[in-house]
Image (spheres, rainbow, N blue to C red):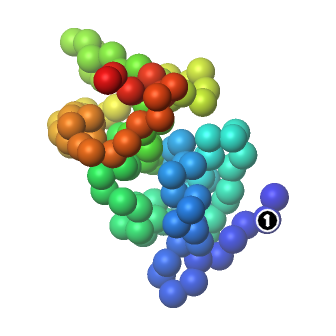
Amino acid sequence: MAIEQSTSNRPSILPQQTERISFIESYGNYVKVYFDSGEHKIIRSSLKSLSNSLPKSWFARIHNQRIINLSRIEIVNHTTQGISLKLKENEVVFIVSRTYSKAFVEAYQAFALSDIPFAKNDPGYCF
């Protein structure tokens, strides 16, 4: 797999790829971007730099090393131990760290109340 170098402090994610992102993980000076198709892309960029280029209404940081696409969430469990979530594309359960839990809840509530259209076959579609 080729590693893409971001140029001029802008990560190399195309706007049309943004809605296909499931989640992003940080690996030091690199980030691994996972897409809904199961593919991934490695980019030489920091997670902070990449997060600044993503739409805030669609993405939320849930851990020091992870950002998720709010539209890809299938299940959210909020228990006394914390918040866990599962995305539509995989069976991995993500844990929201205590540091990011309040910001995640606010972002997810704002996303759920927004005018962002869902597909009728999307589990998030409720009308």
* Nearest to the observer: residue 41 or residue 66: 41
- Where residue 109 appears, as percent x and y from the top left, is 21, 35
The picture quadrant where one finds residue 12 is: bottom right
34 left or right of 63? right
Q: Residue at x 57, y 66 (%)?
A: 13
The residue tagged with tag 1: helix, strand or loop? loop
Q: Residue at x 69, y 49 (%)?
A: 40
Most extreme residue toward the top, as rendered?
80
Is residue 84 visible in the rendered image? The answer is no
Q: Quadrant of the C terminus?
A: top left
Q: Quadrant of the N terminus?
A: bottom right
Question: Which residue is disc 1 drawn over?
Answer: 2
Most extreme residue toward the bottom, as rendered?
8
Within 10 Å of disc 1 (Cα), the crowding (few <14, some 14-19, many 20+) is few
The picture quadrant where one finds residue 77 is: top left
Most extreme residue toward the right, as rendered?
1
- Where residue 76 appears, as percent x and y from the top left, is 35, 21
Query: Eyeballing the image, is 8 above or below 60?
Result: below
Query: Eyeballing the image, is 1 above or below 114?
Result: below
Query: Eyeballing the image, is 67 above or below 44?
Result: above
Q: How many marks?
A: 1
Is residue 55 visible in the rendered image? The answer is yes
Q: Residue at x 37, y 42 (%)?
A: 117
73 left or right of 11? left
Three-letter code for the amino acid on which mark 1 is drawn? Ala
Q: Residue at x 37, y 49 (%)?
A: 59
- Where residue 122 appears, as percent x and y from the top left, is 48, 28
* Nearest to the observer: residue 46 or residue 8: 8
- Where residue 50 appears, as percent x and y from the top left, is 46, 65
